[in-house]
Image: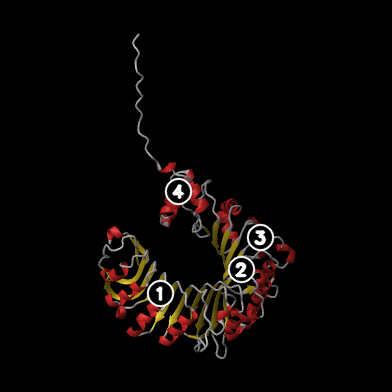
Amino acid sequence: MEVKENQPVPTSPVVPSIDDLPNEVLVMIFRLLPFADRLQVCIVCKRWNGLVFSFLDEHIFLCLSQEDRQVPKGALSEYRTYRQVKLCGSTYDGLEDVHGERIEALAAGARSLVLEIREPQKEEFVQLLRKFCHLRSLTMSCEEFYVVDEEDEGRGLLPNLERLAFEQLGDFRNSDSPDLLKLFMRHRTIRHFVIRYCDPDFHKIVLWMDLLEALAPRLLSLSLNINCFLARYPCEMEFKALKVLYLRVQFSVEGFTADELTQAVYRMANLEDLTIVFFAMVGKHPLKLDGVWQLTKLNKFIANVDSFVLPEIIQPMPHLETLSIKINDATELQKLKLLCPNLKALEIQSIAFNRELWLPLVTAWPTLEHLNFRVGNQFLGVRMLKTLQSLSNLRKLALSGVYKAANLSILDPVLAIATLQELHVKGTWKGSVSGLNRFCRVFVNEKYVPRSAV
């Protein structure tokens, strides 16, 4: 009998699919997409939608407005859970009439709530917070408050709240009973506190200082906008655990300084990230840096002030790696070099200097990895840009302040830096970038330009 050899059945070649990739790889790919494209990815399938809303939702807010009954198509799909919700309206009753069922559906999954309601009355306010019982972050921007009269009425609200922010507040009604603040004074879980703007009646702001004092010992980060004649209040508080501080001091009257406050800041031993902003409506107010070296854990320091003062004897801060400041002359430059010998990231907010100062400025910190400064047309040139090549570790460079059209080809000396990974330019530019260092990503006025197209 003849034996027939079994022939293999022909099969179609296996075509790889993006769906074969594991979730971790897909998330890495989606993270590189622009925000608008991420939202488009969500409508492809349930799996992709779930990945975006589980791992990449830090910039996704669902906003419900009293003025608009409509929401984007598919925004309230059962496969989407919004951790960040924003509610806007004149009154809570009006918002409830328009979006009541939607608010009920969103409340359980929300972890962050931005509340912009012009006049939230006390019953409405407590009722709303009880619905959003799992909140970890609450941001409030309201013009008026009918405050809670009964202390027990707000007991047990928001047991997991970690971040509390007051972006804008107007006048209080029934302001002799500031029980709204008592709601939060009792919280032991709040670690991050923000006060952007408060009641224009400065006598009432003292009530906010009472709230700050109650929260101070447990705070990890604080953003505080304060008038100069209230600066003494934080000096008397204990910020034992504070690691991040944003402090904006407004000078609206003569005769006040922030010296006592800044010295109190320099004694906050655990600070790692410090921003100080002076907004002077009257007079000049330099920032005195004497004693800043007491901050032995400080890694990042931003000083948004017109000028600063350093003493003759300076103790270096070798641990400070990131600095943002305005430099006015060569003396300030030399003192900063002594104060911060090991900078890796430097932002020069503005600079008034001559060409002789430029080279020592660049070479003062040869290990810089990030550099951001306003170059201006008067200093923009191949010769000046070549001095940047001495920064052998430079990975990110940002140039701004170019008001007269400059040709992008002038940036060739910068692109010759082999370590450069990102180049940001702002201002008026024309022409195109050469093919040097194609691994460097180029951004013109914050818009990414593919190297193949420049």
Which quadrant is the C terminus positioned in? bottom left
- Callout 2: few (<14), some (14-19), or many (20+) C-alpha neighbours within 10 Å? some
Residue topped by disc 3: 158
Q: What is the distance, in whole Å, between disc 1 and disc 2 at their CAs? A: 33 Å
Q: What is the distance, in whole Å, between disc 1 and disc 4 at their CAs? A: 39 Å
Q: Secondary structure at mark 1?
A: loop
Q: Nearer the viewer, residue 334 or 80?
A: 334
Q: What residue sits 43% from the left and 87% below the top?
A: 331
Q: In the picture shown, does residue 265 fall above or below 93?
A: below
Which amino acid type corresponds to the residue marked 1 in the rendered image? Answer: Pro
Residue topped by disc 1: 366
Determine whether label 1 and label 4 are within 8 Å by CB: no
Q: Secondary structure at mark 2?
A: loop
Which amino acid type corresponds to the residue marked 3 in the rendered image? Answer: Leu
Query: Residue 452, percent across and down?
Result: 28, 58
Mark in front: 1 vs 4: 1
Which quadrant is the N terminus positioned in? top left
Sequence-earlier tag: 4 or 2: 4
Determine whether label 4 and label 3 are within 8 Å by CB: no
Mark in front: 4 vs 3: 4
Mark in front: 1 vs 3: 1
Q: Secondary structure at mark 3?
A: loop
Which amino acid type corresponds to the residue marked 4 in the rendered image? Answer: Leu
Query: Residue 395, percent across and down?
Result: 39, 66
Which amino acid type corresponds to the residue marked 2 in the rendered image? Answer: Leu
Determine whether label 1 and label 2 are within 8 Å by CB: no
Sequence-earlier tag: 1 or 4: 4
Q: In the picture shown, does residue 2 fall above or below 309?
A: above
Residue topped by disc 2: 220
Visible in this render: residue 154?
yes
Sequence-earlier tag: 4 or 3: 4
Q: What is the distance, in whole Å, between disc 3 and disc 2 at their CAs? A: 19 Å
